[in-house]
Image (cartoon, helix red, strand yellow):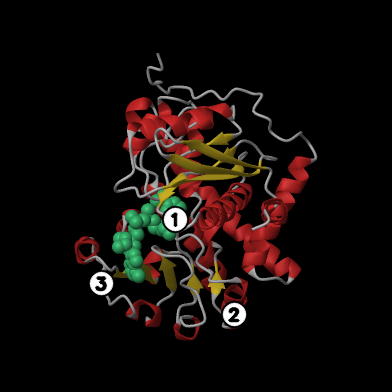
Amino acid sequence: MELFDTIHESEHEQIVFCHNKDVGLKAIIGIHNTTLGPALGGTRMWPYASEEEALRDVLRLSRGMTYKAAVSGLNLGGGKAVIIGDPREDKSEALFRAFGRFIDSLAGRYITAEDVGIDVNDMEFIFQETENVVGVHQAHGGSGDPSPYTAHGSIQGAKAALQKVFGDEDLSHYSFAIQGAGHVGLHLVKQLRSEGAKVFITDIMEDSVAQAVELGAEAVGTDEIYDLDVDVFAPCALGAVINEETLPRLKCKIVAGPANNQLANNEAGNELEKRGILYAPDYAVNAGGLMNVSIEFEGYNRERAKRMMRTIYYNVTQIFKISDRDGITTWQAADRMAEERIQSIGKIKLPFMGHRPHRFPGRKGMDRS
Ligand code: NAD
């Protein structure tokens, strides 16, 4: 891989390789774009087969965060980090504290949070070394688990899509097929059922399905989920589930769910439109978690978080308007909306250089002595 060519292509500002051989730390921080503010995105720990695979992942994920923050109207840039290692075997206090020091050295250009393979206990170690962490435990004045907010935000996105297709967003009139009854999926089932929607659920884990059934969902097989004659298909587990194989099977009118990277490729997004299925772009729909942690900058407040989720409805509606106005697909409209915001706001200020210290009002710091 030609490193600078790759970074040039993906338009990253900075890639930081973090190594501490004494504690076995190999991590990469990707800072994609800080025009709108500090680069915020979680840290993922994964046993990558190669360093190249880890680098590609951090480049892809950090770029995605730029678009998510921009389209959501947040004053944040896009960043992400990966730690190369097996989360079941390679975790230690020293590893996370060493990583925390690297984050601290970036003086606020990058702010981390939880992602796949990282839990709240790991964040506590990082938090001992740097302020530049969000999603910390409520005991420290943080925002805690983002998944109820991600679910709530996804429902706002789905309502915007229902309004566009049917001119009505009363959930009790509609049926949903949810793929994945994990952290977000179960909250989604609960909230949809409380508003009277019909919900079908699938998961590879039987006990997760059982929990969703308890909440009033109807269980279906993992493969059957694509064939259901429902109003909304809500991917809530894996990426790339809208692909060549699944597209001809979909009978839904809308795809709106929280899973990241739902389209296998751009062609899949185009094909959804050709088939008359409205796609609410994933990164606009699932921004509730990011919005929730972003409130830590001004002092976390649950009520404010809930109110902020409503902006997802307006963002998704705006994407549909741009799609209609410019005659482009909704995934293109979302990218355009994000890029236009970065360009226009970029004209009013210099790139964020970490010179303004963040304050996290109400947050109780760790003892760093
Ligand atoms: P999770 O790991 O808690 O849940 C995922 C669920 O999907 C698990 O129960 C798993 O068993 C199930 N699953 C895996 N493969 C499946 C398959 N083939 N068919 C059906 N089910 C399958 O994850 P989560 O935090 O609930 O996140 C769900 C999705 O939402 C992910 O794509 C994640 O990236 C995205 N997301 C989550 C958040 C958040 O706040 N947690 C924020 C933004 C985006």
- The residue mark sitting in front, 1 or 3, is 1
- Front one among 69 and 44: 44
x then y, percent, for residue 76: 61, 40
- The residue mark sitting in front, 2 or 1, is 1
Q: Which residue is drawn at 62% across and 39% down?
A: 75
Question: Alpha-carbon neighbours of circle 2 within 10 Å: few (<14), some, or many (≥20)?
Answer: some
Quarter of the image where one finds residue 210: bottom left
- Front one among 281 and 311: 281
Q: Please tell me which of labels 1 and 3 falls first in the chain.
A: 1
Q: Residue at x 60, y 60 (%)?
A: 317
Task: Name the residue carrying label 2.
Answer: 271
The circle drawn on residue 218 is: 3
Q: Please tell me which of labels 2 and 3 falls first in the chain.
A: 3
Q: Which amino acid does label 3 sit on?
A: Glu
Residue 195 seen by the camera: no
- The residue mark sitting in front, 2 or 3, is 2
Q: Which amino acid does label 2 sit on?
A: Glu
Q: Which residue is drawn at 29% across and 48% down?
A: 88
Query: Helix or strand or loop: what does disc 1 sit on?
Result: loop
Query: Helix or strand or loop: what does disc 2 sit on?
Result: helix
Residue furthest out toward the right: 347
Q: Are marks 1 and 3 in contact (CB under 8 Å)?
A: no
Question: Alpha-carbon neighbours of circle 1 within 10 Å: few (<14), some, or many (≥20)?
Answer: some
Measured along the vertical axis of the image, is residue 149 above or below residue 103? below
The circle drawn on residue 48 is: 1
